[in-house]
Image (tube, rainbow, N blue to C red):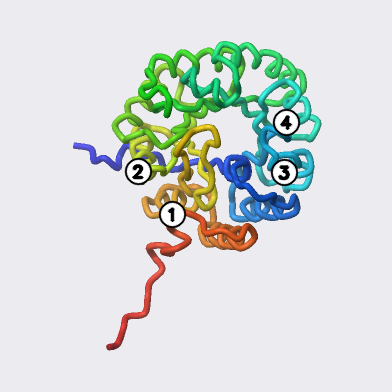
Amino acid sequence: MAGWGDTLPQSVEIVEVGPRDGFQILPDWIETSDKVRIINSLIGAGIRRMEVTSFVHPRAVPQMRDAMEVVQGIDRDRCACFAMVPNLKGAERAIEAGIGMLNLIVSASESHNQSNVRMSIEESLAGFGPVLAVAREAGVPVRASMSTVFGCPFEGHVPVARVLEIGRRLLDMGCVELNLCDTTGMANPRQVAHLACKARKALGAQCIVMHFHNTRGIGAANLLAALQAGINRFEASFGGLGGCPFAPGAAGNVATEDMVHMLSEMEIYTGVDLPALLDAVRQAEKTLNMVFPGQVIKAGRSCDLHVRPTT
């Protein structure tokens, strides 16, 4: 009989989202030079895909008002960088900046979509058409992130059928990747495994990414459930920064360094240099004058041994 480990992938792609998902909810302005330095240090640690900013109106998310300068200041030669865009104008600015991929966002629940972007799901999907058209003309691929796929803080349960239907429409419109997000940390491992299996069958394993929060302390368990269900691409945020400013109680993405450590201990290849990543995260803590919620930067790696007490 095959063991549970026989279903695990040999390698996993880590998609870093801290510079967008993490920075956007911090109240104090982060200097552009500090953002660029943090992003480049993550790239130096082996991160090869990253959401680096969002091209939104400065009044909506003031922290992102330097999106153009950030994109043009980072080391894009070693990392496939992408940015969130809410509309056609944002897409045009992102393409002008030289970004390599666009990220669209829609919720699987009507109330969360209204709270987040003040549109219905249908209105959001209709607005994506012009974005995809201008991106196609520029030769820039587009991915989509779907929020609240495991539950909505306003509505509760979100039907799997709705997630799959929206996902199919996004792919049919031309999106090359679909990111399924546990926006407020409502997912559980059984639910993750169920949706992962359904999504792989209905939408194709090659296009699925998953994004977990550790709001209720089960982010790692959800990651394991997704791994066992055949998912091998995951978003994470350095230090565990992030959350949704429009979702009450949401806080804390799964920390990139915690994810890399767990996968490394399980002998799953990520291509990320964990000691270098930890150095980058600790330096970011100092730069931002924060204590991050991630665990491995506090406890150290499992292989970091201690001197035995003599008394």
The residue that mark 4 highlights is: 57
Report the Cα–Cα distance between label 2 and label 4: 34 Å
* N-term mark: 2 or 4: 4
- CB under 8 Å between callouts 4 and 3? no
Report the Cα–Cα distance between label 4 and label 1: 36 Å
Of labels 2 and 4, the one closer to you: 4
Q: Amino acid at mark 1?
A: His
Outermost residue toward the right in this view: 96
* N-term mark: 4 or 3: 4
- Quarter of the picture containing the N terminus is top left
Report the Cα–Cα distance between label 2 and label 1: 16 Å
- CB under 8 Å between callouts 2 and 3? no
Report the Cα–Cα distance between label 1 and label 3: 25 Å
* N-term mark: 1 or 3: 3
Q: Residues within 10 Å of mark 1 (few under 14, many from 20)?
A: many
Question: Residue 38: image x %, image y %?
Answer: 66, 54
Under tag 1, what secondary structure?
helix
Mark number, residue 76? 3
The residue that mark 2 highlights is: 218
* N-term mark: 2 or 3: 3
Question: Residue 32: image x %, image y %?
Answer: 75, 50
Mark number, residue 261? 1
Q: Amino acid at mark 4?
A: His
Residue 212 sits in quarter: top left
Question: Residue 187: image x %, image y %?
Answer: 36, 33
Say which residue appears at 76% left-offset and 29% top-offset: 95
Q: Amino acid at mark 3?
A: Arg
Question: Residue 13: image x %, image y %?
Answer: 51, 41
